[in-house]
Amino acid sequence: MQSPGDTGGAAAPRFLRVGAYAVCVRDDHLLLARFSPGDPAGVRWTLPGGGLDHGEHPEQGAIREVREETGHDVELTGLLGIDSIHYLQRDGTDFHGLRVLYSARVVGGTLRHEIGGSTDLAAWIPLADVPALDRIALVDIALDLARGADRIPAAPGGGADPGDGRLVRVAGG
């Protein structure tokens, strides 16, 4: 198995993607979006959020993405941390993703599903049911950060290993 940057001597194309995501918890339910069929991540659950537009501030990007994917307007209540992921994609691209994670609360809008986007379903999922979902690792990483910031209660079922070297905890977030 190749590691990132090991291209057998040839320079791999490199791609840096910066995204912003929101952890919205209300009445012990977590707001999630499901990737559309055909998405490279598969039909799995994720946090509302996504890639930033050029020049867009991560806070603005998180707010925009939540609205696009769920119909809700949110107010960001804190910076939880940053997740860094680095791997070699199937096509040989050396991918590095930085994911800025915010806590947020819903202040308006109505739950709806995104049409024609990267997600096809938005839902409030009971926190106790999240461990049973087919979800990307970012969901667990964000929940662990939120629990560490005392923004949501701990739940059974585990989550991301806080010692995996990928998390940056932000003090006072």
Image (cartoon, grey):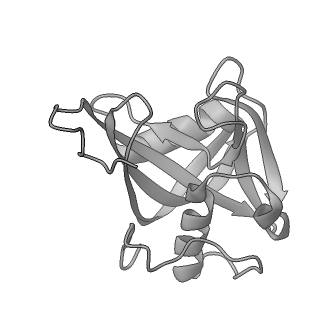
Which residue reaches farthest top? 116
Question: Residue at position x 66%, y 76% from top?
Answer: 152
User: Does 9 sit left or right of 68 as displayed?
Assistant: left
43 sits left or right of 40 in the view: right
9 or 147: nearer the viewer: 9
Q: How many labels does the image show?
A: 0
At a point 36% along the width and 79% down the height, the residue shown is 171
Q: In this view, does 6 lie above or below 90?
A: below
- Check the picture and name the quadrant holding the C terminus: bottom left
- Return the residue nearer the eye: 94 or 55: 94
Residue 63, how many percent across, how many down? Answer: 52, 42
- Along the viewing direction, whichever of 97 and 125 lies nearer the viewer: 97
Residue 16, picture quadrant: top left
Left or right relative to 79: residue 161: right
Q: Residue at position x 41%, y 54% from top?
A: 100
In the displayed structure, does residue 62 sit left or right of residue 109? left
Residue 103: image location, x then y, percent: 54, 62
Q: In which quarter of the image is residue 84?
A: bottom left
Q: In this view, does 50 lie above or below 163?
A: above
Q: Say which residue appears at 24% left-offset and 29% top-offset.
A: 13
Q: What percent of the width, then of the height, locates residue 104?
A: 58, 58
Q: Where is residue 170 in the image (x, y as percent from the top left)?
A: 36, 73
When the figure is inspected, residue 44 is found, relative to residue 127, above or below; the finding is above
Q: Say if 114 sits above or below 162 in the image.
A: above
Q: Image quadrant of residue 92?
A: top left
